[in-house]
Amino acid sequence: MHPDQAADPPAAGKNRWFLLFLGVVGAILLFLALVRQPGPPVGLRHPGVGDRFEQLSVQPLVNTDQAVTLDDLDGKVTLINFWGPWCRPCLMEMPELLALEKKHRAQADVRFLLVAYPNSRDSDDEELKADATAALDQLEGDPAIYYDPQRHLIPELIRAAKLHEFGFPTTVLLDRQGTIRGIWTGYDPSFVRDMSQALERLLAEKGFKKVS
């Protein structure tokens, strides 16, 4: 055999191991792609978009002395945030949410309802107020905070949006007619940005077409 025709055994071995490595990596990636399930739709494509609350009533907790009912939201674009001062994901998204609230605070046709919930049914109103105040102090924010003493609002959201489960934080966007236009559950760094864009579109729009 001519020397130039002889295979280089070490090089051939390295190539075989490299090809084997690529095959294993490819198989793993294919497996992950097959088993990975897409997350539930959120925001404007949430299944609850297009539904409505039949009742809503929250009481003042911090930085306000006014209760709010569904009638008070008529004609306003409203962002309702369900949160708790004990909830780490809630606190992670809160700085951006507070900045968004402050940006629109002076607008008469925008309403933010930041509704705080305790970690336990045994907690009293004063404890929740103290915890919410401490959280706002830490975040250096001063928005109005409300609470739901009878805990009627979460079941009403579950009914209205046909939710299978509820978790904190959850944010709901209502248009001027009180129709749900977006629902975000959990924390994601992109959520508040998406909320802001959706809110701006609602302020600018004339009518409503459900996102398909």
Image: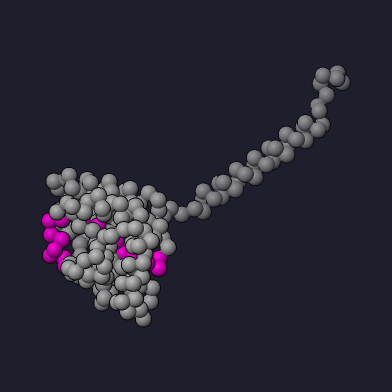
* Stretch of the chain drawn in magenta: 69-87
> Residue 161, position in %: x, y?
27, 63
Farthest-out residue, bottom: 122
Q: Classify the position of the N terminus by image quarter.
A: top right
In-front residue for pair 64/57: 64
* Direction from residue 90 to residue 55 in the image, left or right: left
* 55 in relation to 105, above or below: below
Q: How many labels does the image show?
A: 0
Whether residue 164 is visible here, answered yes or no, is no
In-front residue for pair 132/70: 132
> Residue 133, position in %: x, y?
33, 67
Whether residue 70 is visible here, answered yes or no, is yes
Q: Magenta segment: does it hold 86? A: yes
* Direction from residue 4 to residue 91 in the image, left or right: left
* 116 in relation to 50, above or below: below
Q: Magenta segment: does it hold 148? A: no
What residue is shown at x 60% (from left), y 48% (from top)? 28
In-front residue for pair 167/96: 96
* 139 in relation to 146, above or below: above
What residue is shown at x 40% (from left), y 57% (from top)? 92
What residue is shown at x 54% (from left), y 50% (from top)? 32
In-front residue for pair 110/28: 110
> Residue 52, position in %: x, y?
20, 62
> Residue 156, position in %: x, y?
25, 69
